[in-house]
Image (tube, rainbow, N blue to C red):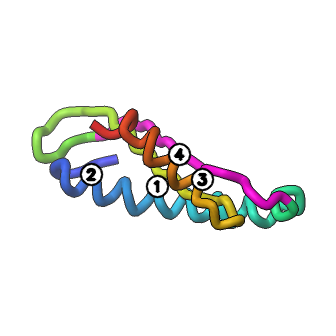
């Protein structure tokens, strides 16, 4: 993955990983066993990859995590859990 600066990197990762989480959620909700369960909690995608910072001209590695509350009972447990653990992923 190539990027030119931190702002572009964050924007690109947010877009792609968030899309991946939504796709995973849709697939998971399509599984009969998952549909029967009222609360599934928190779904997290964590990506690690090699990258090239074209602005600095150096190789790097990047990590990004995105989570979504997939608890259909409306309690928001997954959202609260993500709020607690998100700090461990973001510096």
Residue ID for mark 3: 77
The residues tagged by marks 1 and 4 sit, at their Cα atoms, a distance apart of 19 Å
Going from N to C along the chain, the mark reached first, 2 or 4, is 2
The residues tagged by marks 2 and 4 sit, at their Cα atoms, a distance apart of 26 Å
SS at circle 1: helix
Residue ID for mark 4: 81
Front residue (pair 69, 23) = 69
Residue ID for mark 2: 9
Going from N to C along the chain, the mark reached first, 2 or 3, is 2
The residues tagged by marks 2 and 3 sit, at their Cα atoms, a distance apart of 30 Å
The C terminus appears in which quarter of the rendering?
A: top left
Look at 24% across and 51% down and name the residue there. Answer: 3
The residues tagged by marks 1 and 2 sit, at their Cα atoms, a distance apart of 12 Å
Going from N to C along the chain, the mark reached first, 1 or 4, is 1
Q: Is residue 45 left or right of 41 when viewed as pictured?
A: left
Disc marking residue 17: 1
SS at circle 3: helix
The region drawn magenta spans 37-51
Give the label, 2 or 3, closer to the camera.
Answer: 3
Front residue (pair 68, 74) = 74
């Amino acid at each position: 993955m190539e990027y030119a600066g931190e702002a572009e990197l964050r924007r690109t990762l947010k877009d792609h990983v968030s899309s991946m989480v939504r796709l995973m959620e849709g697939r998971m909700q399509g599984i009969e066993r998952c549909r029967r369960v009222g609360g599934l909690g928190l779904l997290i995608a964590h990506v690690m990859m090699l990258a090239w910072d074209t602005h600095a001209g150096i190789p790097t590695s990047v990590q990004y995590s995105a989570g979504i509350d997939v608890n259909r009972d409306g309690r928001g447990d997954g959202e609260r859990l993500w709020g607690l653990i998100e700090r461990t992923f973001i510096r």
